[in-house]
Image (spheres, helix red, strand yellow):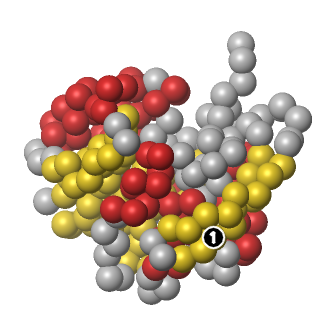
Amino acid sequence: MSEHYFSESPTSPEERGLIRTKLRGFYFEFETSSGVFSHKRVDSGTRLLVESMTLPERGRVLDLGCGIGVVGIVAARLNQALEVWMTDVNSRAVSLAESNTKRNGVKATVRQGSLYEPVGDVKFDLIITNPPMSAGIDAVVKPMIEGAPTHLVANGVFQLVVQSNKGGRTLSGIIDETFGNIEVTSRGGGFRVFTAKFP
């Protein structure tokens, strides 16, 4: 079986690199490596999510399936009052996310584990994700959506980006069924950002 970026412990040789990019008016540097998602650039879906995300004024934000930490690190830079958490199943991604928080001068809690296991019973004001579609909708992405309400405070928000022609309709149905509401808050480059609010 070939190794994927959602492998828990990648065994492929590490080919390190550095991504320099501008997001939300700030310059960032992200150390990256083979064996993690989109290791040569900030992918279009993540970029759309970052550029359109609406952050709470205070409280906790969870970057679920954080990869090298792009979404969570930008959130921490934009609002230093937030308590940012980042989680990923991939040990290499978690290590890079930790080093990237330091590289970009922000603070975040970074933990390894599957789905919501790493955060225990902690609740968040915003859960935001570019989900690993290659890991399977039923096996991974659907549980990410259906588990979100348990980890959101009242009026908490869930945001997810997906490629419109690769599961967009399926995920929008799961989100609407889970939350009872859904809105397309941004679109571009074949991607859509879905936003739902927990009552």
Q: Position of residue 39 (x, y in %)?
A: 68, 44
Q: Position of residue 12 (x, y in %)?
A: 84, 31
Compared with residue 38, is residue 106 higher up or lower down, i.e. above or below? below
Image quarter of the C terminus = bottom left
Question: For the point 31% across and 33% down, which residue is it?
Answer: 164
Q: Secondary structure at mark 1?
A: strand
Question: For the point 62% across and 41% down, which residue is it?
Answer: 37
**Foreground residue, 192 or 198?**
192
Q: Position of residue 14 (x, y in %)?
A: 86, 41
Question: Residue 152: which quarter of the image?
Answer: bottom left
Q: Which residue is mark 1?
A: 28
Identified by mark 1, the residue type is: Phe
Question: Residue 170: which quarter of the image?
Answer: top left
Compared with residue 127, is residue 180 higher up or lower down, i.e. above or below? above
User: Would residue 15 be found to the left or right of residue 111 on screen?
Assistant: right
Question: For the point 16% across and 50% down, which residue is it?
Answer: 183
Image quarter of the N terminus = top right
**Foreground residue, 45 or 81?**
45
Question: For the point 42% across and 67% down, which residue is it?
Answer: 61
Compared with residue 176, is residue 71 higher up or lower down, i.e. above or below? below
User: Would residue 59 be found to the left or right of residue 40 on screen?
Assistant: left
Residue density around tag 1, few if under 14, some if 14–19, many if 20 or more, within 10 Å? some
Q: Position of residue 17 (x, y in %)?
A: 80, 52
Q: Check the image and name the residue furthest to the top.
A: 1
Q: Is residue 117 visible?
A: no
User: Would residue 85 be found to the left or right of residue 172 on screen?
Assistant: right
User: Would residue 81 be found to the left or right of residue 35 on screen?
Assistant: left
